[in-house]
Amino acid sequence: MSENEKSWTRMSFRGNKVWAETDSSGRLKVKNGKVLIKYNLKQNYQYLVKMENLMPEEYAQTRDKKTRKSKKTEKNSTADFPDETIFPDETIPENAIVIYTDGASSGNPGPSGIGVFFCFGGHKKEISEYIGTSTNNIAELTAIERALKELKRNDLPIRLYTDSSYALGLLNKNWKPQKNIELVHRIKSLMTAFKDLKLIKIKGHAGFEGNETADRLATDAIKMKH
């Protein structure tokens, strides 16, 4: 079935308006407890999310109005990251190389691995590497470094997604590194070579294919070594 033949309905997912796939009767199309969603019908990116995390748009709007006032007083752990996103949005350039990176450490410090998932047009590439005994923060940074080193072109737009607030703080927000100073400096040096590079904070473990793939690649690297 082509994209044009699929049916979609407006829903809310974690406070964001999305389109969810429906069957011929207009009901949500559920497979293994998950539903296919898109942030924008014109975009190519689509994701499988747990059905229980979806709700009718009207109900979500009512709930949000009731809780908005109280939420303003709550401390937001991602307040330093206004560009945090659950979805790679429709503003991604059509010719962009989209990358998801993740790092994993069993023990922190302990056996560690990195995962990198590239998407460019219809092409995809995966990297899963064991990096020895390390910390989760080092693994997150190393995954980003590995991704940038792998790129053969610096003239195309690059959109790199990571769920690491630590990595984004150091690389996007100019946090002063207390540890891993040389690694941070190496990555920043690599970043200067690209004409249009954007690192974006994505919500981890939220059911999105790219991020989940990178996470699997990182953990698989540790499993294969041990």
Image: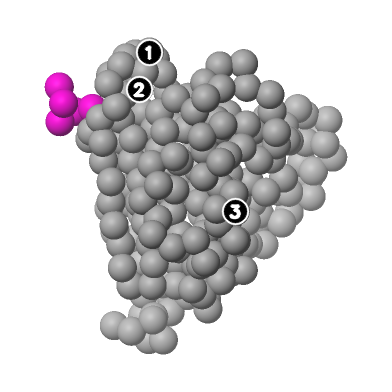
Mark number displayed over residue 198: 3
Tell me how far mark 1 sits from mark 2, CA to CA.
7 Å
Q: Which class describes the residues within 10 Å of circle 3: few (<14), some (14-19), or many (20+)?
A: some
Give the residue drawn at x 70%, y 36%.
173
Q: Picture coordinates of residue 112 (x, y %)?
A: 31, 24
Residue at (43, 54) in percent of width and height? 99
Q: Pick the residue in front: 83 or 35.
A: 83
| Residue 142 seen in the figure | yes
Provide the secondary structure element on which disc 2 rests. strand
Q: Are marks 1 and 2 in contact (CB under 8 Å)?
A: yes
Q: Position of residue 82 (x, y in %)?
A: 72, 45
Return the residue at label 2: 105
Quadrant the N terminus occupies = bottom left
**Mark 2 nearby-residue class (10 Å; few <14, some 14–19, many ≥20):** many
**Residue situated in front as seen by the camera: 225 or 59:** 225
Place of residue 207 in the rendered image (x, y in percent of width and height, measured from the top left): 41, 48
Mark 3 and mark 2: span between their CA atoms?
Answer: 25 Å
Q: Which residue is at 33% across, 41% downward?
A: 115
Q: Is residue 23 above or below residue 208?
A: below
- Answer whether residue 127 is magenta in the image: no
Question: Between residues 21 and 132, which one lies in front from this camera angle?
Answer: 132
The three-letter code of the residue at mark 1 reads: Pro
Q: Main secondary structure of the magenta part?
A: helix
Q: Quick check: 125 above or below 8?
A: above
Q: Is residue 74 left or right of residue 145?
A: right
The residue that mark 1 highlights is 109
Q: Which residues are magenta?
A: 222-226
Which mark is first along the chain, 1 or 3?
1
Vertical comparison of 130 with 159: above or below: above
- Do the numbered discs 3 and 1 sit on residues whose CB atoms are within 8 Å? no
Q: Secondary structure at mark 3?
A: strand
First-in-chain label (3 vs 2): 2
